[in-house]
Image (cartoon, helix red, strand yellow):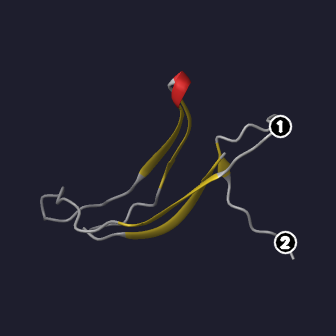
């Protein structure tokens, strides 16, 4: 059986020891109205930073859910 792995963002292939952070974006509830018609097209951006270097390793974004203030993404991202 073939394994179905999600891509790992920011992972350096030459690292001896690897840790993986899994982030699941589930939903938004009662988001602010940003469109003229009173809805929004929300999405979420996630960044992984190296804190002591103030350097971004990876930037990912969920799908955009059109015309809603209560989006449901249920998307997982893996950072390493």
The image shows residue 8 at horizontal and vertical percentages of: 67, 50
Query: Element type at marker 1?
Result: loop
Q: Is residue 78 left or right of residue 43?
A: right
Task: Give the image quarter of residue 58.
Answer: top right
Pick the residue in front: 40 or 30.
Answer: 30
x and y percentages locating residue 7 in the rendered image: 68, 54
Marking on residue 63: none
Task: Please give the name of the residue rendered at 87% of the width and 77% of the height, measured from the top-left corner.
Answer: 1
Give the residue at x 75% y 44%. 18
Q: Secondary structure at mark 2?
A: loop
Q: Nearer the viewer, residue 37 or 1?
A: 1
Q: Badge 2 is on which residue? A: 2
Q: Residue at x 73, y 37 (%)?
A: 12
Q: Quadrant of the C terminus?
A: top right
Q: Are marks 1 and 2 in contact (CB under 8 Å)?
A: no
Residue that carries the numbered disc 1 in the rendered image? 16
Q: Earlier in the sequence, mark 1 or mark 2?
A: 2
Gap in angstroms between the C-alphas marked 1 and 2: 25 Å
Q: Residue furthest bottom?
A: 1
Q: Is residue 78 above or below residue 31?
A: above
The residue positioned 39% from the left and 61% from the top of the image is: 64
Q: How far from the left and from the top, in percent, is residue 45?
A: 43, 49
Left or right of 24 in this view: 27: left
């Amino acid at each position: 059986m073939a394994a179905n792995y999600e891509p790992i963002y920011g992972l350096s292939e030459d690292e001896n020891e690897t840790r993986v952070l899994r982030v699941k974006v589930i939903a938004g509830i009662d988001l602010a109205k940003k469109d003229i018609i009173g809805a929004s097209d929300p999405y979420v951006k996630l960044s992984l930073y190296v804190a002591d270097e103030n350097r971004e390793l990876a930037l990912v974004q969920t799908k955009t859910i059109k015309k809603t203030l209560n989006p449901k993404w249920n998307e997982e991202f893996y950072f390493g």
